[in-house]
Amino acid sequence: MRGNRGAHRGSPDSGSVTDVVVVGGGQAGLAVGYHLRRQGLDFVILDAEAGPGGAWQHMWASLRLFSPADHSSLPGRLMPIQSGHTYPDAAHVVDYLADYEKRYDLPVQHGTRAEAVHRDGDRLLVEADSGAWRAKAVISAAGTWSRPFVPALPGRGVFAGRQLHTVNYRRPADFAGQRVIVVGGGNSGAQIAADLALDGDVDVTWTTQRPPRFLADDIDGRALFDAATARRRALDAGRDDTGGVASLGDIVAVPPVREARDSGRLKASPMFERLDRDGVRWADGTRASADAVIWCTGFRPALTHLAPLGLRGRRGHITTVGTRAADEPRLHLLGYGDWTGPASATLIGVGRPARDAAREIADLLDA
Ligand code: FAD
């Protein structure tokens, strides 16, 4: 039987019992909270962050969304326009998510990290750093930000300069007068390289594994979302894979990227082969000295709390059917990437898989 409408806020010390525990209170956790509430389920959202906003709290100052505000909204509430900006910044997203959490009175327990999820008879036991919950279902929406990925290139250990990942980058002033290598041909690499290049006080080299693929200037996240939707429809209908987002390109030409590229300040070099003490070296023997290397080389899904369930398969992912774990019907995964639903790891795209996950869990609990 389902719990009462409204969320359970019982003390974890008593081993609280609830219908659903959501791990992660970023946009994915909030979107599914919205739908769990509509389903009348009893739930709690555990979030490791002290405040609302998930990973958006940690993104660099100049970052711009790749879609306008009205195409960056969670279910139920449009993101307001940010005055003076077609493409909002990360602070605007944090404000929006904080407001969303409050507006729907979502039971987010901030500052609580889920450490392990175990099977416990007909329940799943979620052990957190400040207590435990026994739930009929768990939704993992822990994102990827806490698991930055850096490729194992030769010489990484001997480079004497600074090495950072996207997650540590803040602003060009931190690199004033320095030679910086930015690695990565995706949106983060392009935006950070552009940010440094436009500053004028940083000597930046942008390296990418293959020549950068810019989307046409008039294409932004709206078209990416449409492509993801068309792909989902094609696959649902048993038609050929349209290629989805990847068929359009990798980099959205948001205004700073376009400005840096068109003024000749954002040019990509091929990927170097190794690092040495003072810089990087290409296969043909060319080298460049560097004070810092910024790895914009992506993320892995945060799934370690699910390890006791023994579900991890190929590429470290958990096999899913929609959002449900194929081998554990009480577990759903949300956000993370396309493997948990097309465009699931975007603001506008997470709404639909969130709705489906909440419905499936409601059905499971009713059965
Ligand atoms: P997160 O925002 O990472 O939230 C997960 C939450 O779970 C965090 O608060 C984290 O602390 C918490 N958590 C993790 N582990 C645990 C645990 N064990 N216990 C409890 N809590 C835990 N999308 C767009 O739609 N538009 C964009 O323009 C866009 N730009 C992006 C730019 C960059 C640089 C990146 C990296 C991503 C971008 N995205 C964009 C993609 C996506 O929207 C974001 O990555 C977004 O933060 C994903 O939300 P999430 O809720 O899945 O994860």
Image (cartoon, rainbow, N blue to C red):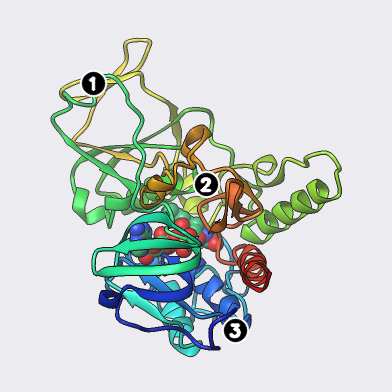
Q: Position of residue 137 (x, y in %)?
A: 52, 65
Which residue: 44% across, 47% down? 309
Q: Quadrant of the C terminus?
A: bottom right
Which residue: 49% across, 42% down? 311
User: Which one is in front in this view, the residue at disc 3 or the one at disc 1?
Assistant: 3
| Secondary structure state at the residue bearing disc 3 | loop
Residue contact at pointers 3 and 1, CB within 8 angstroms: no
Which residue carries the number 2 mark?
262
Instruction: Inspect this view and state whether residue 360 appears.
Output: yes
Which residue carries the number 1 mark?
155
Separation of marks 2 and 1 at Cα, in angstroms? 34 Å
| Circle 3 crowding by C-alpha within 10 Å: few under 14, some 14–19, many from 20 | some
Q: Who comes first in sequence, dot 2 or dot 3? A: 3
Number of numbered discs on residues:
3
Q: Residue furthest top?
A: 284
Which residue carries the number 3 mark?
40
Q: Position of residue 295 (x, y in %)?
A: 33, 39
| Secondary structure state at the residue bearing disc 2 | helix
Q: Who comes first in sequence, dot 3 or dot 1? A: 3
